[in-house]
Image (spheres, rainbow, N blue to C red):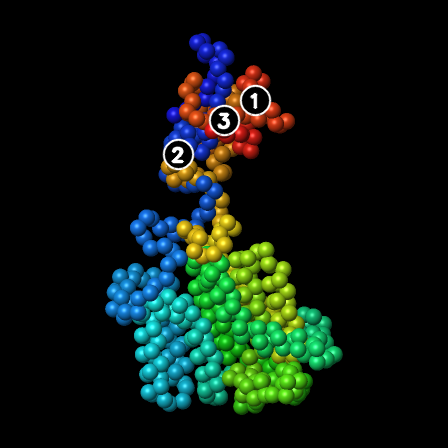
Amino acid sequence: MSQLSGPTPGNAKSRPSLPFLLTDLNEAILNRLPSRYHGGRRRSKSNSKILPPGVDDITSLQTSFSLWDGVRRLQRRRWRKMDIQYAVVAFIALFSLWIAPSAPLTKTAAVVGCVWLLLMPATSQFLLPSLMIWTWLLYFFCSRFIPYEYRPHIWVRVLPALENVLYGANLSNILSARQHSILDILAWLPYGIMHFGAPAVCSLVMFIFSAPGTTPVFARAFGWMSILGVTIQLCFPCTPPWYENEHGLVPAEYGMPGSPAGLARVDAIFGIDLYTTNFSSAPVPFGAFPSLHAANAVLEALFMSHCFPQFRTLFIIYAGWVWWATMYLSHHYAIDLVGGGIIAAVFFYTSRAHYLPRRQPDKLTRWEYEYVEIGEAHASFVDDDRDHYFHAGLLSHRRGSSTDGWTLGSGSSWASSSGTLSPTTSDATTPGESVLGADGQGRVWDGLAPPREIELHEVVIGR
């Protein structure tokens, strides 16, 4: 172990040498700390998944189509509290099938087929993370079969009133006041085309070019956000702007047809029925709040910005494009967009803090990753050789009463009787390593100048 060298009777001109900060310093001082203070290289307090030699690469995919392999994996699985989400998904799926028209053979075949695909490792690795999305689609389309007598009151005046209170006007009516075929096409592209394909495109791009495990987190967040959105729309049904434009503020009733609103102009431009019939018979015609178009765009923009921060501006523009289109086509009020955006932000930041793998800027594709770190980064230092961790907060300035050239720490829980804890002096140094203190002008310290306090950023490490 190298120690601080200084003048001795036998060697008056020996040059001072500080110990190598991240190895000998830890051995000299930090090993005396309680174990709760140990901790590593600048690294997060996150769940790092580093595979040892001999274990399948984290980028590998399952290729087995054997049901028995899936059964054995299920038997070996260690169940966690988060697995209760699958029970909730099963309940929502069975409820949706129960309220749907009677078709026992079709329903049984669908359940058996789903279980079959979930048991095969090659298919379950893709179906299981996206199970929430498929459940949301089933839940959304089967919600039309909920009996009217069990549904709540439809709110007609709430959203227009909130719009006027918060913004002083109906922004949807303002944006849709001037209509033009070019604007119709510009609004149709994100609302009627990109909205339906963007989740698949984002999933594919993140699967190839992001850290392994990113796409499953996105799929789960997208699915649960959509399920929550539909549930709010069913429990708090509100009329969209097109209803106010066509019917005024008269009470709405279940069974009334929906409307394509501005998308009817797109059908007229192309001369085909792309949206009129589908939106007129929509499962949730009074699902204005929250806007899932806005929520999806915000969630996609946030996840893509996390994975590809260099394109953040483009993703923000896309989200704003969708928001404008929803109001221009008279499908949502501005308050609906804000509500959807808030829900999307909550799901993203929760996912990023606890489940989302952190990107590594030097990696281009998923196959270049050797390990992934989960959650947000909280910086600390690590001793690479010993894998000991300690927080930077433990490195502090020396006390004013100390006469040492530099001092490590002054906490009362581990300070010496003199008020400081500093290395001893010796001629021994670590072979191949030297530490030179540089002054404020960048000149190398020769050991002759009066000792002064050395900051961590003023230490030059040489090998």
- Residue type marked 1: Trp
Q: CA distance from mark 2 to mark 3?
A: 24 Å
Q: Position of residue 176 (x, y in %)?
A: 70, 78
- Residue type marked 3: Val
Query: Could you tell me which residue is drawn at 61 percent across and 27 percent down?
Result: 442
Q: Position of residue 440 (x, y in %)?
A: 62, 27
The numbered disc on residue 33 is: 2
Pointers 2 and 3 in contact (CB under 8 A)? no
**Front position among marks 2 and 3:** 3
Q: Under tag 2, what secondary structure?
A: loop
The numbered disc on residue 445 is: 1
Pointers 3 and 1 in contact (CB under 8 A)? no
Residue 427 visible to an observer of this rendering: yes
Outermost residue toward the right?
178
Label 3 crowd bin: few (<14), some (14–19), many (20+), radius 10 Å: some
Residue matched to label 3: 435
